[in-house]
Image: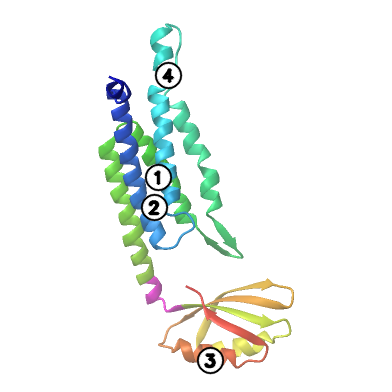
Amino acid sequence: MLWETIFDDNFILMMNRIFFALILSGLIGFERELKNHSAGFRTHILVGVGSCLMMLLSLYGFEAYTQNYEYVRFDPARIPSYVISGIGFLGAGTIIVNGMTIRGLTTAASIWAVAGLGLVVGAGMYKAAVLTTIVILLSLVLLNNLERHFRSKKNRIAIQLVVANDLNIDQLLSIFKEKNVKVEKLEIEKEAEDRRLFIYLSHTKTINKFKLFDHISKIDHIKQVTERQ
């Protein structure tokens, strides 16, 4: 029957592995989607399923040649090695460099890991794939909360200012000194008419950041004060 011809043992095996790769990569992508990262649910699924497909091609795509021709040799690791090295372009696209601040490294790493998951599932190593997925999810969720906990302990504030070019920065620094706030890092972006300042502050005593923002906003030539997350 046509149905049995299409859904033979090989096809069912491939179908199971592709769906398994979809589920595992989708779980990691969903975690990234919840945090509004540039590469989320769909991107991770496409990478995981695509990698699984490449692994299946490497394992089963050349059987007709190896069985029918005695002198044909093939290396099942060749295609996966290109997948691992080639996925870097997608990871690089999620990394955003803004002055001294770099974002997207974790998402880039998760994309690279999902490509590896797809290859592992394509090779039929289900247990290793499930274990790795659990480890990745725990790392993304728990370690992120741990990082936030340590950041909150350090009492750090990050603010963004839009200021006119003739702002006297000494006035701004005097407010920080008055409030016993230490400037850890200062980034300045020059624009057509204004400047954009990214200031990272730390303080040892309890401080009302809203009052601090109010004091800053009263300085001449400061147009906007916002907190950065």
Q: Residue furthest top?
A: 70
Which amino acid is tagged 3? Answer: Asp
Residue 214, which numbered label? 3
Identify the residue at image location x=32%, y=39%.
19
Q: Residue at x 48, y 35 (%)?
A: 83
| Residue placed under numbered mark 2 in the picture | 29
Q: CB atoms at circles 2 and 1 under 8 Å apart?
A: yes
Assign a secondary structure to mark 2. helix
Q: Residue at x 32, y 54 (%)?
A: 137
Residue 62, disc: 4
Q: Nearer the viewer, residue 125 or 148?
A: 125
Residue pointed to by mark 1: 114
Instruction: Give how far across and how far down residue 175 sits, in percent.
Output: 57, 90
Between discs 4 and 1, the one toward the N terminus: 4
Q: With 153 as the anchor, is 180 left or right in this view?
A: right
**Where does the magenta region start and end?**
150-156
Residue at the extreme left: 127
Tell me if label 4 and label 3 are in contact, CB under 8 Å.
Answer: no
* Residue type highlighted by circle 4: Phe
- Look at the image and say whether residue 140 sits in the magenta stretch: no
In three-dimensional space, the C-alpha distance between marks 2 and 4, rounded to whole angstroms, equals 31 Å
How busy is the neighbourhood of tag 4: few (under 14 within 10 Å), some, or many (20 plus)?
A: some
Around disc 2, counting alpha carbons within 10 Å, would you say few (fewer than 14), some (14 to 19), or many (20 or more)? many
